[in-house]
Amino acid sequence: MAGCAGEPAPAVTVTITPTVTPTPTPSPTPTPTPVPTEEAALIPNPTVPDLVPNAEPVPLPQGPAADQGATPGARGTTTADGAGALLTYTVVEGDAFFDIAQRFNIPVQLLLTMNPSVPGLGENIYIKQVINLDWTTTR
């Protein structure tokens, strides 16, 4: 094939025409139609039985205070009458009303009743405050 030179192939022109594909228009998702439901039948309130009051409250035990000895939350001093019955307790630093009640074997509620001047349900006692220990009086 020597000496054979052929004519060059003619150039081919290709024309590309882009075709635009239309973007589909989104169609809205149909909202489901609510299905009516039957309303629940109304039921009248049940009849309330006659109310019976609670039993009588158990009274707080009362009696003279008995010193169980100083504890970390009740280290103050006491006063007593001539017969030795405890009358008062003087609060010192670090005392707590609950611990004072425990030291003298008195329910906290009763000690609060005996000491209506003690504010904050016994949470707000102060140093040198005098607490009544005589269950027959209030202070």
Image (tube, grey):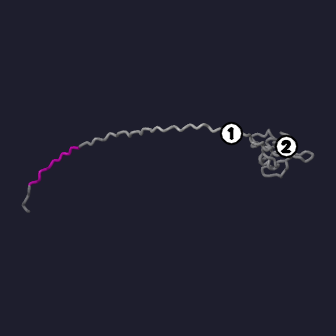
Q: Position of residue 67 (x, y in %)?
A: 84, 50
Label 2 or label 1, whichever comes before in sequence order: 1
SS for dot 1: loop
In this view, the residue farthest toward the right is 82
**Residue sitting at 78 percent across and 52 percent down?**
72
Which mark, residue 49? Answer: 1
**Residue sitting at 80 percent across and 39 percent down?**
116
Q: Position of residue 16 (x, y in %)?
A: 20, 45
**Residue sitting at 85 percent across and 43 percent down?**
135
Nearest to the observer: residue 30 or residue 75: 30
Q: Is residue 3 above or below residue 131?
A: below
- Residues tagged 2 and 1 counted as in contact (Cβ below 8 A): no
Give the magenta range. Answer: 7-18
Q: Is residue 69 above or below residue 88?
A: below
Q: Looking at the picture, which amino acid does disc 1 mark?
A: Pro
Q: How far apart, in angstroms, are the residues tagged by discs 2 and 1? A: 41 Å
In this view, the residue farthest toward the bottom is 1
Nearest to the observer: residue 11 or residue 82: 82
Residue 113 can be seen in this image: yes
SS for dot 2: loop
